[in-house]
């Protein structure tokens, strides 16, 4: 439950080994969060992530969670909320896939879509319902600048994020006035050490590591800072870096023949 000053006391990270998720957890712990739940596939990486956060002082729990196992989402996540109120839920899981491989392998492409969109819709609705039931809380969803317009180099991944972005906006409208705050975060390419692209592995899913034009590459720490600021402002949309907002406003309206010529 939030303290008297409105500072979140509890955080649930879906994608418990996500670089962005962990950076956000560290930042929120420094600001007063006392309980953290890391939801992800059981693994040495998830255990290590939990241990690293415990060293900072909070109580940290791990929760078995697989984005693709949607039948188990309500039960697994329901147990978290049964332990007490959750102030902030951060949906940070996703996979980038491999565009060239996935174009030739529809099963692999579907796996990207199911993880990034179907799994996120399922988990998002479960958490939204629980937040609404407790009467307060924020749901933060990591989308991506890649979802703003289809690019040849990553349109399978981008389409999954586009769907997730529209879903999150609609969910925010549906929950408006209920006490539940919904915020979509659109980072550029995120440079981090995370290397796993397996479903449920906790990749940020916000851009290919080190890809993109240098001015629009960001870091997990920068995204975490933007998330915290957005929560304090109760923003509905956050761009990271902020300059992407104006850039993408222009890019969205470029004629397709011109857009195809851009080095993006």
Image: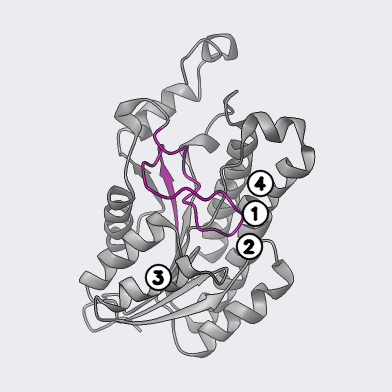
In the rendered image, residue 149, in percent from the top left (x then y), is placed at 55, 29
The count of marks equals: 4
Which of pointers 2 and 1 lies earlier in the amino acid sequence? Answer: 2
Q: Secondary structure at mark 2?
A: loop
- Residue at point 71%, 49% (across, down): 111
**Residue 16 picture location, percent across and down:** 47, 66
**SS majority, magenta:** loop
The residue where tag 4 is placed is 112
Q: Does label 3 or label 4 sit earlier along the sequence?
A: 3
Tag 3 or tag 2, which sits nearer the N-term? 3
* Residue 177 seen: no
Name the residue that disc number 1 marks.
Answer: 115
Height in image: 231 above or below 262? below
Name of the residue lying farthest toward the bottom: 83
What residue is disc 2 on? 67
Q: Are the residues tagged 2 and 1 within 8 Å (C-beta)?
A: yes
Q: Is residue 58 visible?
A: yes
Estimate the spatial distance between the alpha carbons at disc 2 and disc 1, rounded to whole Å: 6 Å
Task: Pick whichever of labels 4 and 2 is earlier in the sequence.
Answer: 2
Mark 4 residue crowding within 10 angstroms, few (<14) / some (14–19) / many (20+): many
Nearer-the-camera pick, 177 or 144: 144
Nearer-the-camera pick, 67 or 140: 67
Label at residue 48: 3
Mark-to-mark CA distance, 3 and 4: 26 Å
Q: Contact, CB < 8 Å: mark 3 with mark 1? A: no
Identify the magenta region: 183-210
The x and y percentages for residue 217 are: 34, 35
Please tell me which residue is depicted at 66% across the width and 77% down the height of the picture: 74
CA distance for labels 3 and 1: 23 Å
Quick check: marks 1 and 4 in contact, CB under 8 Å?
yes
């Amino acid at each position: 439950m939030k303290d008297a000053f409105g500072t979140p006391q509890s955080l649930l990270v879906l994608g418990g080994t996500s670089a962005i998720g962990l950076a956000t957890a560290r930042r929120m712990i420094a600001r007063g969060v006392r309980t953290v739940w890391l939801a992800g596939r059981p693994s040495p990486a998830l255990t290590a992530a939990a241990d690293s956060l415990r060293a900072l002082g909070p109580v940290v729990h791990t929760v078995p969670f697989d984005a693709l196992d949607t039948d188990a989402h309500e039960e697994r996540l329901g147990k978290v909320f049964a332990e007490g109120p959750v102030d902030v839920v951060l949906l940070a899981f996703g996979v980038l896939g491999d565009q060239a491989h996935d174009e030739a392998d529809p099963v692999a492409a579907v796996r990207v879509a199911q993880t990034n969109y179907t799994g996120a819709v399922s988990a998002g609705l479960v958490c939204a319902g629980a937040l609404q039931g407790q009467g307060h809380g924020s749901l933060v969803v990591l989308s991506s600048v890649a979802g703003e317009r289809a690019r040849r180099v990553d349109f399978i991944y981008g389409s999954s994020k586009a769907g997730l972005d529209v879903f999150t906006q609609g969910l925010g409208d549906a929950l408006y006035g209920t006490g539940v705050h919904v915020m979509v975060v659109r980072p550029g390419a995120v440079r981090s050490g995370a290397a796993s692209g397996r479903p449920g592995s906790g990749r940020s899913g916000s851009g290919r590591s080190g890809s993109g034009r240098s001015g629009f590459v960001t870091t997990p720490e920068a995204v975490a800072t933007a998330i915290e600021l957005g929560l304090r402002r109760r923003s509905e949309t956050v761009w990271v870096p902020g300059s992407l907002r104006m850039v993408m406003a222009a890019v969205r309206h470029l004629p397709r023949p011109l857009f195809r010529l851009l080095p993006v």
